[in-house]
Image (spheres, coloured by chain):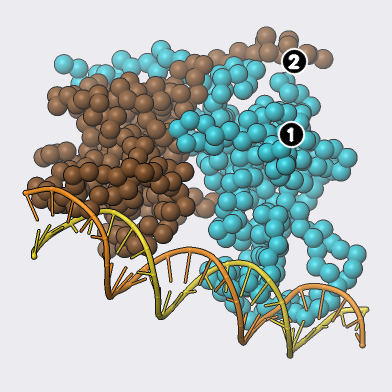
Chain colours: A cyan, B brown, C yellow, D orange
Amino acid sequence: MQSEKEYLSNYNIKDYERPSVTTDIAAFMIRSEESDNYKKDSENKLSILLVKRGVHPFKDCWALPGGFLKPNETVEECALREITEETNVTPVVLLPVGIFSEPGRDPRGWIISNAFFSVITEESVKQVGGDDAADAQWFDVNFQQEKNGDFHLVLSLKDVHLEATLEKEKTKYGKNTFVIKDGGGLAFDHAKIIATAVSLLRKYADDFNTIFDFLPESFTLNEVQKVQETILNTSILPANFRRKINDYVIETDEYTQGAGHRPARLYKRK
Amino acid sequence: MQSEKEYLSNYNIKDYERPSVTTDIAAFMIRSEESDNYKKDSENKLSILLVKRGVHPFKDCWALPGGFLKPNETVEECALREITEETNVTPVVLLPVGIFSEPGRDPRGWIISNAFFSVITEESVKQVGGDDAADAQWFDVNFQQEKNGDFHLVLSLKDVHLEATLEKEKTKYGKNTFVIKDGGGLAFDHAKIIATAVSLLRKYADDFNTIFDFLPESFTLNEVQKVQETILNTSILPANFRRKINDYVIETDEYTQGAGHRPARLYKRK
DNA sequence: CAAATAGTGTCTCTAAGACAATATCAC
DNA sequence: GTGATATTGTCTTAGAGACACTATTTG
């Protein structure tokens, strides 16, 4: 009879075939674009971070930031490390999206990816400053269902428009996944990962989750509303939104200034 | 300048360190226990499948069924293969729970686990028949929060009671996880995986998801109600439950027979 | 008939959507 | 003053919970 100690000393993990494991991070930010009308508040756009691949495979294609899992770190730590390396900013949210292990998804061989969903504040990115020539860029996100049932994902940066088309598939065993009909030039299966991450973000935002994470510590109720409306691509009457959000915030004694209209009370998250 | 083809032919995946990847499956079933009162309907119990480990490490401990990911299969296929091998039954649901990659979670080395949530019908298990001496057994599940805030997980099979204690941890970056205070004799970090899976099941059942998957094709509304009540550990007035469930079912023209009380109409899921 | 589940109707309360009305700032 | 956002109030409607009541079966 072998003891556990003996067993482990004879056990060689390299006797078995093993995949490489990566993380890919769908990092979202909401960017505000100043209006030319001094009375109007700024417009919001949902954006996602993409990096231009400098090496094969998919050289020169845009891809999600990510990298290989190293020994003695969790997948969460790996995702955090990769996103921080890429942006020099620490995200405020990092949540799992799913595991992508389809054989053939990576031409280099057996590589499975853990996808993460992350939120980064515009405030923190502005502090770091942007490099226009950098290989990491924030793309505007547009994701919606067409009349024919397909989903259309458009990622835009100035003149660059990456347009992917996906189909929702109700698989056996209760899981819903996207199937790529046209990857839109994105590397690997990243169109699928982004579609899944945006869907997850919308589900969260619908329940008032993660919406505060896009904002600074203090915010007006209208700012929260615009974050939710930007993510969900909907609009709601301010009076009704205020009633619903009220449970999630604490009012402060401070007000906005110089906005071209009545000052708004600042709130903090509860 | 190297072409993608050249790059890939020079790429050797074995140059990098890689973890082993496993799947673990939390397979749930609802068992009905006949009452001695002919008028009363049967009582339901939520149960989970555990296997007694025959090899090191954690030899003779109870563990979730699972196994190593093989080349050319997805993690979902791996989970399906493992649960089918163990039960000779095809599950009706197989959904991801999370990835568990904490260094040191497996004494054999760098092994990360993809946990899945699965539902198996009592009907299908009865057809296969049970082996009392088998190393795979269904344990009754009891999972609840104590007054002190800790979570108590008790898995029972006749005289065997595995009692684990966990703490809910609100980690940075928005994720909630369980931390094992006492693993209750379960192998690896399986107490944590089970706690996470039960929480997920309850979230699903609360929204009327997966509750039909525990039942045969035709069922009475009271049977659906009892499944939900068993999972959520709550009770609800039948009149109100009927109103809510009505959107999810289609009535048939068939009725139950010989139940010691008024026959009930049978329904199918919509 | 007794005990159990099946099934319907209705009252109340709450939450959400629609909308009206007033308040206050920069220019 | 104008045009924008800020803020409050109220009407209506939909849904959930509580509860009363009737129906139908088996032993």
Secondary structure beneath disc 2? helix
Mark whose residue sits in front, 1 or 2: 1
Compare residues A215 and A150 and report the one nearer the observer.
A150
Q: Quadrant of residue A245?
A: bottom right
The residue identified by callout 1 is A164
Q: Is residue B9 left or right of residue B153?
A: right
Q: Nearer the viewer, residue C3 or D4?
A: C3
Vertical comparison of A245 with B220: above or below: below
Q: Quadrant of residue A250?
A: bottom right
**In the rendered image of this protein, does residue B109 appear above or below residue B179?**
above
Q: What element does badge 1 sit on?
A: strand
Q: Position of residue A251 (x, y in %)?
A: 59, 77
Q: Identify which residue is drawn at 61% across, 13% down.
A: B12
Real-space Cα distance between discs 1 and 2? 23 Å
The answer to whether residue B50 shows anywhere in this view is yes
Q: Chain of mark 1?
A: A
Disc 2 chain ID:
B
Which quadrant holds the N terminus of chain B? top right
Q: What's the residue type where badge 1 is placed?
A: Ala
Disc 2 target residue: B4
* Residue at 78% across, 51% down: A129
Q: Position of residue B116 (x, y in %)?
A: 41, 35
Three-letter code for the amino acid on which mark 2 is drawn: Glu
Q: Write the residue at 14% across / 27% down.
A: B132
